[in-house]
Image (spheres, helix red, strand yellow):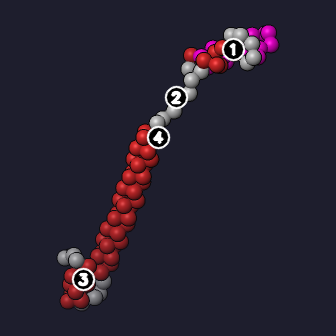
Amino acid sequence: MDTIRKIRNEFAHSLIEKSFEKSPIREWVLGLKIETKSSADQTEEAEKTYLSKRSTYRFREISAKIGGFLQASIVIAASDMPELEKSKVFAALGSEE
C-alpha cells in the first residue's frame, strides 16, 4: 500500500511530467506484488458462502411455514367451525389448540 501511495504522490505533487516508464516510478511498479488466494482458500470460502446461503434459505422456509401454520391456527380457532371439526383439523396439522 505504501508503494501505491508513493506512486500516486509522485504524480499528484509534481509539476514535472511523470511517466510509468521512468525511475523511480518504473521500479516501484515492477516491485509491486499481487497476493492471491490459493485455490484451497477460494474453495473453502465458496463452501462457507454456499452453506450460509443454504442456512438462510432453510431458515426463511421454516419461518414461513411456521408463520403460515400459526396464521391458519388462529383463523381456525376464531372460526364458527364446530369444536369437533376444529380438533380434527388441528390433529391433522399435528397441533393441539
Which image quadrant for residue 8? Answer: top right
Is 62 left or right of 16, judged from the image as shown? left
Q: How crowded is mark 2: few (under 14 residues within 10 Å), some or many (20 or more)?
A: few
Residue 11 on image: x %, y %: 72, 15
Where disc 3 sits, the SS reads helix
Where disc 2 sits, the SS reads loop
Per the rendering, the mark at residue 39 is 4
Q: Residue sitting at 42 percent across and 40 percent down?
A: 40
* Disc nearer the start of the sequence (3/4): 4
> Closer to the camera: disc 1 or disc 4?
4
Q: Which residue, given by chain and number where applicable, does mark 3 sit on? A: 92
Where disc 4 sits, the SS reads helix
Q: Which residue, given by chain and number where applicable, does mark 2 sit on? A: 35
Which image quadrant for residue 20? Answer: top right
- Is mark 3 in CB contact (under 8 Å) with mark 2? no
Span highlighted in magenta in the image: 3-19
Question: How far apart, in angstroms, are the residues tagged by discs 1 and 4?
Answer: 32 Å
> Closer to the camera: disc 3 or disc 4?
4
> Closer to the camera: disc 4 or disc 2?
4
Q: In this view, does 4 lie above or below 73?
A: above
* Disc nearer the start of the sequence (3/2): 2
Q: Which amino acid does label 3 sit on?
A: Ala
- Is mark 1 in CB contact (under 8 Å) with mark 4? no
Residue 55 on image: x %, y %: 36, 55
> Closer to the camera: disc 3 or disc 2?
2
Q: Which residue, given by chain and number where applicable, does mark 1 sit on? A: 25
* Disc nearer the start of the sequence (1/2): 1
Q: What residue type is labelled 1?
A: Ile
